[in-house]
Image (cartoon, helix red, strand yellow):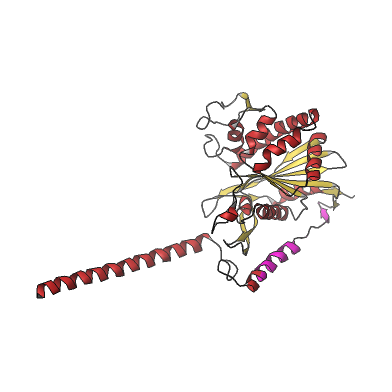
Amino acid sequence: MKSTKRKRAARNRKKILALVAGVLVLFLLSFLVVMLVKKLKPEPIEGAGEALSRSEIEASERIRQSILDEAKLNKEVNYNGHNYKYNENIDVLLIMGLDDRDLIDYTQLSGKNEQACADLILLAVFDKEKKTYSLLQINRDTMADVMMYDVFDTFMGLYKRQICLSHIYRTKHEDACEDTKFAVSHLLYDVEISNYFALTMDSISIINDSVGGVTVTIEDDFSQIDPNLVQGQTITLHGDQAETYVRSRGGIVNSPTNINRMNRQRTYMSALLVLLGQKTSESNSFAFDLFDKLSPYMVTDCSHDQLSNYISQFSDYTLDKIVTPEGTAEVGEDNLMEFKVDSASLRGIVIDLFYVRQD
């Protein structure tokens, strides 16, 4: 009898020890997760990420609005000893290529507000007096002031992040685009951006094939990605090949960097824009038929008339230049690539594209 009691007591002690050990393991894991999150994410505005009161949410939004209010463009500047005035006779369209196949409805995903990165960031600057337009390509890894939010869409503050991440923190597509619009404008000394136009990656082949394919010379080694893209050969891209050409980075043998990819994107865009202009001139319905096909993959704040105006400008104006700011690329502390733009190069481009010399 005593032996049975001792055995039962021993079993109970083992159960208690196992329970205590389990609790300790869970506590340790929880501690490690908390520490990891703190390491990966910046300190938010006090209370952000919790079930905030209405007054706290409103205070957070006031901080965000004050940042927007303080981002004021200087319309008269002195640069290299000369006076310049902001060109009021331009239209500026922000074009974004999103790293996603479809426009996912993130409002239906509980506890998630992480959208696709803005993989391609391009500004089209139309000079209505000269009847020309220029394209300003911004490296997706450019370090910039990015608005961050928690999973409840509460504003956390401005943080230095890769500019492509300016698109990922909101639930609604339009809000994400507006935040990227702010990040780009703020990087460029708060220039005025008229409208935005965002497309997912599935749109690339649709646009490419709408003009019958785009002819390019393959300058990189795609042998590990698509053996049909032979280095040194000139070919016409069709279907998914267009996406492979403009988006591939990691599998490129000779230079797997975003800078190399940007070079390819400029080559591709130069050829594509000529073909789009030709197609638009040949058919009045071409552009609108194309936009109908793109609508499932598109987010824009443009009205029908504004879209029509941009189509006409791309078709009728002459492409002046495609430029990108200089800078240095290096791997950051989080093991992600960081592009630190050269301020002198950036300033010169902004003056050239957005200002008119007065003396």
* Residue 178 at x, y percent in the picture: 70, 54
Describe residue 57's horizontal placement relative to residue 93 as left or right.
left
**In the displayed structure image, the side of residue 13 where residue 238 appears, left or right:** right
> Which residue is rendered at x = 71% and y = 38% of the image?
292
Q: Nearer the viewer, residue 300 or 157?
A: 300
User: Where is residue 254, by image quadrant?
Assistant: top right
Please identify the quadrant where the N terminus is shown: bottom left
Residue 45 locus on image (x, y percent): 60, 68
Which residues are drawn in magenta?
58-80
Q: Relative to residue 114, is residue 280 drawn left or right?
A: right
- Above or below for 237 versus 178: above
Q: Nearer the viewer, residue 49 or 143?
A: 49
Q: Position of residue 283 (x, y in %)?
A: 79, 29
Residue drawn 53% across and 39% down? 250
Identify the residue at image location x=18%, y=73%.
9
- Of residues 291 and 73, the one nearer the viewer is 291
Q: How many marks?
A: 0
In the image, is 38 to the left or to the right of 341? left
Which residue sits at x=75%, y=35%? 287
Q: Is residue 114 magenta?
A: no
